[in-house]
Amino acid sequence: MIYPVILSGGSGTRLWPVSRALYPKQLLPMLSDKTMLQETALRFPESARFGPTSVICNAEHRFAVAEQLQSAGIKPSAIMLEPVGRNSAPAAAVAALHVQSVDPEGLVLLLASDHRIERPDVFRAAVETGALAARAGQMVTFGITPDRPETGYGYIRRNGALDGMESCYAIEGFVEKPDLETAETYLASGDYYWNSGTFLFRATDFLAELKRLAPDILKAAEAALDKGHSDLDFRRLDADAFSTAPSISIDYAVMEKTALGAVVPLDAGWSDVGS
C-alpha cells in the first residue's frame, strides 16, 4: 500500500497579504473552489492501492486542516502537529515512523500541500511507476520535465535507467538553482529535471538510511512521537524532543547522500505556487 503524507507546515511568508501566518496559501482556494490542501488530498483517494492520507502541520493550523479534510470527505489516518518548524527531513522521519506503525511494508508518498498539478491522472501513473522502484529499496523523487530555462528551481541530474524499470533513473546528483546560462544547458541536455520536492519510499528503507546518514533526526522524531500525546483528533509531537532535531531538508539530509536515489520524470502540469 502507498500512504500519502501531506507536509503542510508553510508559514504564509510568500504571497502575502493573501497568504498569512494563520492562513497560509495551502489553506486557501488559490486555484479553484477547493483549497490547495484539499486538492492535494483528493489526488490520491483511499483505494485498494492507496491507504488513508495523513497530514503533518503547524499546531496553530490544526482546526482549519481538520475542518477542510472533513468538508472534502477525507478521513485522515492521522493529523500530526509540529510544535516548531524543522524543515522537511524531521517531518519525513515522523511520516515514515507513522506509516511503519500502521503497515511495516507500507510506502510513504511525501507530498507538499501547495503544489499545482493540472493532470492528476498523469501524476498517479508516475507514482505507480515509482512504486516499483520503491518496493525494490530505492528512494524515489519525481523530476519535473522542464519547459524553460528556469533559474528559480533546483535541478536533478539523471543517470542511466534502473535495471528492468522503464522511466525510472538513478540519480547522478542534485544541483542548486542555476544562473540563466547554466539553466539553458540543462534544458538542452535533456538529462535534468526540476526538483519537485515529492518523494516515495518504503518507510523501513527510509528509516534505515536516516539512521545511517542522520541519526540525530531519527532519534528526535522517535522521541517526539513516543513522548507526544493525543489531543482530540490530533497527535501532538513532544515539543522538547522535536526541537532537538536539526532544521534541514530531506534533500540535504538523505537524498544528496544516499546511493539509493532514483528519479521518475513527471510531466503533469506541475507548479510550485509561490510567486
Image (cartoon, grey):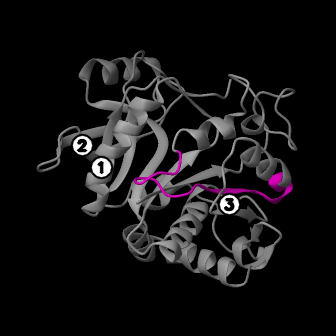
State which quadrant residue 128 falls in. top left
Indicate which disc, 2 or 1, sits on the residue closer to the N terminus: 2
Indicate which disc, 3 or 2, sits on the residue closer to the N terminus: 3
Can you identify the residue that label 2 sits on? 168
Q: Residue at x 73, y 58 (%)?
A: 85
Q: Secondary structure at mark 1?
A: strand
**Residue type at tag 2:** Cys
Task: Tell me whether circle 2 and circle 1 mark residues in contact (CB < 8 Å).
Answer: yes
In the drawing, does residue 139 fall left or right of residue 11?
A: left
Query: Is the residue marked by circle 3 packed among few (<14), some (14-19), or many (20+) residues within 10 Å?
Result: some
In the drawing, does residue 221 fall left or right of residue 205?
A: right
State which quadrant residue 255 falls in. bottom left
Residues rendered magenta in the picture: 45-62
Can you identify the residue that label 3 sits on? 86
Which of discs 3 and 1 lies nearer the camera? The answer is 1
Q: Residue furthest left?
A: 164
CA gap between label 2 and label 1 equals: 7 Å
**Residue type at tag 1:** Ala
